[in-house]
Each structure stands twice: as C-alpha cells, then as structure tokens.
Amino acid sequence: MAYITVGRVLRAQGLKGEIKAQNLSDDPARFDKLKAVYIGGRPYALTAKRAAGAFAYLSLSGVTDRDTAQSLSGKDIQIDRVNAAELADGEYFIADITGSVILTESGKILGEITDVSQFGAADVIEAKNGDKTFRFPFLKRLVLNVDTVNKRFTVDEGVFCGVCVYDD
C-alpha cells in the first residue's frame, strides 16, 4: 500500500492523549475528511479532530494519555493513497517525484530528486548527482515534463543553468 504524508506530529496537547499536528497539505481542512491515519507505520482511527490554521488537533484510538501522545512527536502522519485528494493538472505529490531522474530535453542526466521544500513563491527541488547536492525552483518555464510513472523529470537546460544552485 502506498502512503502520502499529510502532516507531522508536533507534540502532545493536554493530558488526555490529543496531539498537535502540522498540516503539510494544501488543504486547511485536510484532517476533517479523514477517518484513519498512519503514524510510524501503525494505523490509528481518528476519534476527534479540529483545525486551527496550519495546525490540527487530533485524538487517536488507543492514545489516551499525554505520555503516549508525546511518544509520537516528530513522526509523519500518513494516509492511504486512495484517500489522497485529487490533484489539478500540473500538481504532483512529493512522493511521486522524489527519486525521479532529472534530465535535459536532450537526454543529459543531471541527477536525482531527493526532496522538495515548499515555500510561498515556488517549491524548491533538492537533488543529488554523486556527492554534489543542488537545488532549483519548480518553475513552469523550467520544467518541461513530469513523468511520475517512469520517474523522469525533464527540464530546460538553459533555464536550469540560470536558476540552479549547488551546495559547496
């Protein structure tokens, strides 16, 4: 079963096992639509949930005290892929592009996507080629094609050279 990460447990909230979670999806009401989540690979039914901005407060089945809730801190909150939101054209799940080979339109391999950071103006792709790490923004003028099935991410070489930043 494939999972999609939709949040991260920040800490315990109160004494009765509630957790405070950061919502990592674009939908502020993401958790309102869910009946179950996976944390640390273990399934939990959601017994109560409420949203507050970029955060959600969740009560999980079997988590009834502060210590148990606190033990989940820092772990990702995931859902079954079948429960994932529908994406518009040009939108991708981070899990679908991570591991993709980055190539130019002429087929030159530039590296492999290792992570995506989400910022206000544009998402930033992090990639590696051997021991070199580099980053570039996900821009319409740069990204020519995203093939999530074959894990291929094609970029315009000229634009790429102008926006790519290599770590020292």
Image (spheres, helix red, strand yellow):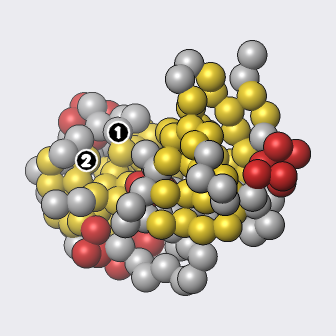
Secondary-structure class at tag 1: loop
Quadrant assignment, res 3: bottom left
Work out which residue is located at the far left of the displayed protein and give it: 62
Counting from the top left corner in percent of width and height, residue 112 is at: 51, 40
Q: Which of these two is toward me, 130 or 87?
A: 130
Residue at figure coordinates x 58%, y 43% from the top left: 109
The Cα–Cα distance between marks 2 and 1, rounded to whole angstroms, is 6 Å
Residue at figure coordinates x 83%, y 54% from the top left: 159
Secondary-structure class at tag 2: strand
Q: Which residue is mark 2?
A: 39
Query: How many discs appear?
Result: 2
Q: Is residue 26 visible?
A: no
Q: Which residue is mark 1?
A: 75
Task: Compare marks 2 and 1 and give the one earlier in the sequence.
Answer: 2
Work out which residue is located at the far front of the displayed protein and give it: 106
53 vs 104: above or below: below
Residue at figure coordinates x 24%, y 60% from the top left: 2
Work out which residue is located at the far right of the displayed protein and give it: 162
Badges 2 and 1: C-beta atoms under 8 Å apart?
yes
